[in-house]
Amino acid sequence: MPRVVVFTGAGISAESGIKTFRDSDGLWEEYSIMDVATPEAWRRNPDLVLRFYNARRIQMRKAEPNEAHRALARLQQHMPVEIITQNVDDLHERAGSENVMHLHGELNKVRSEIYPHPQYVLEKDEIHLGDLCERGTQLRPHIVWFGEEVPMIEQAARLVSKADILLVIGTSLNVYPAAGLLYHAPYGCRKILIDPGDNSAGGIFRLTHIKQSAGNGVPAFVNELIRECESQGA
């Protein structure tokens, strides 16, 4: 039974109506990334940062998983699948997927602006200045901002290093260090990129690029993989 590791980027969530900052020249919902998604932005104007992520959280909770999310959940019923995502939404989980690693944090969680642990699941839509953790410090979104370390990157690299099939979805492979995960795939690993755009992964050995949207390409590939698995098991 092949071990499948899936690496998803913003493109899979965009098809559920969640916009990305790369859609419009570095603007994210009309905000500059430097004003809402960096440690400096937090220190300069935490109220703006909180309002920005409150709006993103409300948007996320109105969005629904699409056919690509549901296809990956279906694949887990047939073979071991682990998902690494750059996305901070919960659409994989709501589609039914388990074993989801969020490299860049989660909109549904908050933590202290000082202490990285613990993280708290946020039941309400918004957090505000004056909302404190149990240690008495201001809560901030549990998001890895630009300029911060990605704490899960080594664990993600270990997952990729054990993959028989590496399925990459909805990413231009331009954001590092996450894009560098592909270089950890073992020799002989089957590597597939499903994304309609061009990519910068020319140096990845034996990478098959399916130039389709996630909503079209992922269900088709998953169905093919399930048929392969069933025929080999027959």
Image (cartoon, helix red, strand yellow):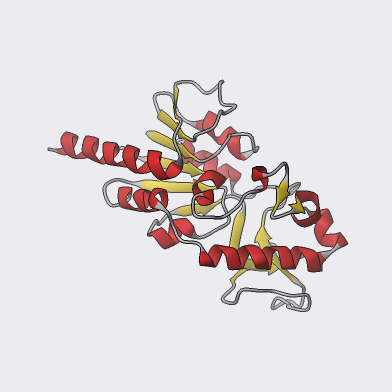
| Residue found at the very far left of the displayed protein | 234
Q: Is residue 148 visible?
A: yes
Q: Is residue 51 left or right of residue 77?
A: right
Q: Is residue 208 left or right of residue 19?
A: left
Residue 114 sits in which quadrant?
bottom right
Quick check: 132 above or below 17? below
Quick check: 192 above or below 151? above
Residue at image point 56% right, 21% down = 202
Residue at image point 40% right, 59% down = 95
Which sits in the foreground, 12 or 234?
A: 12
Which quadrant of the figure contains the N terminus? top left
Q: Residue 70 in the image: x percent, y percent?
A: 37, 53
Which quadrant of the figure contains the C terminus? top left
Q: Residue 101 in the image: x percent, y percent?
A: 51, 52
Which sits in the foreground, 6 or 69?
A: 69
Quick check: 41 above or below 218? below
Quick check: 144 above or below 187? below
The total number of labels drawn is: 0
Residue 130 sits in which quadrant?
bottom right
Which sits in the foreground, 67 or 138?
A: 67
Q: Is residue 115 visible?
A: no
Q: Is residue 200 left or right of residue 45?
A: left
Q: Residue 122 in the image: x percent, y percent?
A: 59, 73
